[in-house]
Image (cartoon, rainbow, N blue to C red):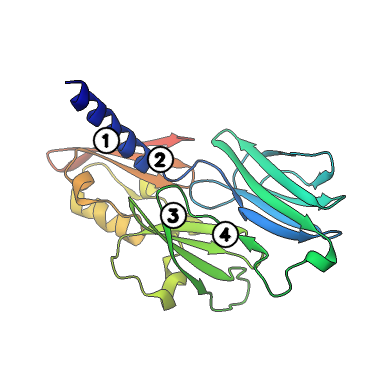
């Protein structure tokens, strides 16, 4: 009995960790090597990869000066060393590791920043973005997570612009920009769903918003979608929508 309970606890913990693979707040880039005298930008983002709200910052040392407030700041460093930049918001905490070096130690042509995969996820590929006017995305990072495929859009400085889940098993790396989430254009599943809609109609809305829903979730009477402002919870009865609810800050 004790072995069974231990196994049950282990499985429950594993499922819990898998469900929590995306933190409520992350700092991008995750790590950086900075030349002494240079300023370094950092951006705090929420679960959708968009700038977080009500963010405050601090650092591990008084030798770091943080300029600005909100989701994006500039960090200045007085002396070489290893530092941690911390961000805090109502949705969680995040941090970035920084190594500040003199010119002789600066990695010419080497990796100057990195963005870590989320817990339980693995980076499958990094794909250069196609330059376009007004677009700051420099590369796409594709991750494979317990929940599915995740695409993250990053600037040349490693700042995350957005991220989105994709349901397709075979992802075309040359068209990752096409997965830019619809909510960036002001669209929301919750805003589009109407009472008495069928399950198929809601699935079509979810597909247009690039928001996947597993077969196991589709069999339930309550569907939950992650959106930029929070979760959208939709309740069905006899195959029709009977209720929709926005859960802000979940």
Residue sitting nearer the eye, 198 or 30: 30
Query: How far across and how far down the image is residue 30, in percent?
Result: 61, 53
Q: Which residue is mark 1?
A: 11
Q: Residues within 10 Å of mark 3 (few under 14, many from 20)?
A: some
For residue 3, above or below residue 199: above
The residue sitting at 45% across, 34% down in the picture is 250
Query: How far across and how far down the image is residue 16, in percent?
Result: 34, 36
Q: Earlier in the sequence, mark 3 or mark 2?
A: 2
The residue sitting at 68% across, 65% down in the picture is 112
Give the SS element for disc 3.
loop
The quarter in which the N terminus is drawn is top left
Disc 3 or disc 4, which is closer to the eye?
Answer: 4
Q: How many marks?
A: 4
Tell me how far mark 1 sits from mark 4, CA to CA. 34 Å
Residue sitting nearer the eye, 83 or 91: 83
Point out which mark residue 20 bears: 2
* Residue 203 located left or right of residue 29: left
Q: Which residue is mark 4?
A: 161
* Residue 159 located left or right of residue 153: right
């Amino acid at each position: 009995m004790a072995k069974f309970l231990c196994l049950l606890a282990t499985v429950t913990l594993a499922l819990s960790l898998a469900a929590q693979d995306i933190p409520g707040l992350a700092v991008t880039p995750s790590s950086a090597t900075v030349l002494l005298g240079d300023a370094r930008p950092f951006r705090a983002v929420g679960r959708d990869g968009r700038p977080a709200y009500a963010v405050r910052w601090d650092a591990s040392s008084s030798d770091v000066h943080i300029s600005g407030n909100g989701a994006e700041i500039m960090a200045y460093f007085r002396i070489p060393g290893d530092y941690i930049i911390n961000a805090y918001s109502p949705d969680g905490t995040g941090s970035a590791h920084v190594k500040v070096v003199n010119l002789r130690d600066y990695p010419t042509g080497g990796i100057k920043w990195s963005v870590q995969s989320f817990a339980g996820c693995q980076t499958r590929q990094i794909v250069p973005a196609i330059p376009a006017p007004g677009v700051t995305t420099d590369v796409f990072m594709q991750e494979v997570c317990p929940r599915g495929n995740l695409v993250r859009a990053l600037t040349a400085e490693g700042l995350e612009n957005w991220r989105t889940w994709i349901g397709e098993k075979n992802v075309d790396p040359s068209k990752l920009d096409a997965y830019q989430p619809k909510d960036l254009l002001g669209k929301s599943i919750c805003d589009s769903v109407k009472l008495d809609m069928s399950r198929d109609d809601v699935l079509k809305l979810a597909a247009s918003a690039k928001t996947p829903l597993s077969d196991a979730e589709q069999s339930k009477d309550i569907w939950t979608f992650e959106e930029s402002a929070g979760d959208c919870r939709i309740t069905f009865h006899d195959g029709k929508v009977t209720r929709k609810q926005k859960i802000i800050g979940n």
